[in-house]
Image: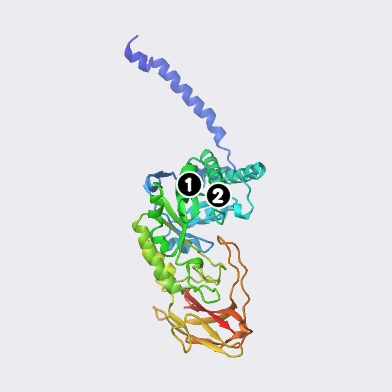
Amino acid sequence: MSGTRRRHGTRRARIARTTAFALIAFLAAPLTLPMTAASAAEAAKSATAREVTVAGERILVDGKPFAVRGATGDGPLGELAALGATTVRTYGGDPGPVLDAAEAAGLKVIVGLWVGQPRKGADYGDPAFVARQLNELRATVQRYRDHPALLMWGIGNEVEVDLPAGGDGAVWPAIEQVAAMVKRTDPAHPTMAVLAETGTDKVARLRAQAPSIDVLGLNSYGDALYTAPARARDQGWTGPIVITELGALGQWQAATTPWGAPFEPSSTQKAIQIRRYLKALGEQKAGTILFLWGQKQEVTPSWHSLRLAGGEWLEASEAMADAWGGQTPGGNHAPRIAWLRVDGDPSAPFASWPADAPGSVRLNAVDPDGDPLTATWRVMAESTARGIGGDAEAVPPVFPQAIQDGGLDGATITPLPPGHYRIFVELRDGRGAGATANLPFELR
């Protein structure tokens, strides 16, 4: 038999094969026609899903470098995307609504898989707990692994925090167990573990004991941000690094009053710092996720909040837009607060006066666009809660009767019972932007 015929067969055989293939295709076609709305939606999701891989220090989407930049929180995602963000991060629970909203806004999602923390009672020596947690997380991965907005899986958040020296031995194998399950269930998306800073050897221990982790997530605040990526590299981390929580200053880093109340920077001071940190981290090719795109009580209602409770965005949004090539809503600028001071003692970092006497504070603020500002003042009790790792805190009592003559220049505080308090001011420009500052004081 000739070589030609061995490769191609006879003309009659080729016709027969062609006819057979056509018949198979014809017979198979009707089986694919009936499709439910649900299966059509799943098919559409799979068709638009993106390939996410890790190459050295970079995260790639469809083979192209992907810059992780964004925030975590429940604020409007369309506005976040307009600032130039690419990513939103979640911590746990059902990520479906966030994935859908992110897809509509053109964002990717780091989907958090909540891994039980030993400090809150998670017992990794209990096989029933381990199996139950693993099954629950597997179900989440199976359900959302084909969602087109999925970027990667965030395995836990600060699971190692607040444990005695040497007491984190069960943490790293637990992270590895979840990460290995995720890789088996969804090999198409990277895994990331989130640590509270680098510690002296945390990154090295994660690297040695959780090899299924692809991306290092670090929650870091204040000037520690300048060196966080380098410190992780010094411990041997060679893959991508994402700063998974970024803030101007942690309350644990702040100076305090004699009674222990930490001094909170104004929204303007925070924006100045955030600009510096985003520039430094961008130069080190680290991803950046700010905390918190929303509003949350943690020492105060404003400490980590990038928005006021009414939804107004703060100057930090301008810092994000400047760093990421985006724009604030309408190109608007937030009000600036130059200072909030004790009346009569401008250099005092806090106030203290007799409980039976009034006190007052002075405010200096401006709007860069010349928009007319409104000021809202309130006095709250100083929070005594000092949660760990972002644990929920109760909002302290408010004393609405304590404010007298509050305006754009300052406010007078009427007598209150002896104790420790804060006076807050919120400014609004009527175009969706705001500013905030507060000052601790003591009545003795």
Q: Amino acid at mark 2?
A: Asp
In this rendering, would 325 be left or right of 188? left
Residue 51, position as x, y percentages in the image: 44, 44
Q: Residue at x 48, y 88 (%)?
A: 343
Residue drawn at x 41%, y 66% is 274
Q: Quadrant of the C terminus?
A: bottom right
* Mark 2 crowdedness (10 Å alpha carbons): few <14, some 14-19, many ≥20: some
Q: Nearer the viewer, residue 174 or 150?
A: 174
Observer-nearest of 125 and 45: 125
Q: Is residue 213 above or below residue 9?
A: below
> Are the residues tagged 2 and 1 within 8 Å (C-beta)?
yes
For label 2, the SS is loop
Residue 424 in the figure: left or right of residue 232? right
Q: Position of residue 165 (x, y in %)?
A: 54, 53
Q: CA distance from mark 2 to mark 1?
A: 10 Å
Residue at the spot of label 1: 205
Position of residue 431 measured from the top left corner of the image (x, y, whole percent): 47, 75
Number of the label disc, if any, that sits on residue 234: none
As displayed, is residue 194 above or below residue 387? Answer: above
Residue underneath mark 2: 168
User: Could you tell me which residue is drawn at 46 percent across and 67 percent down?
Assistant: 249
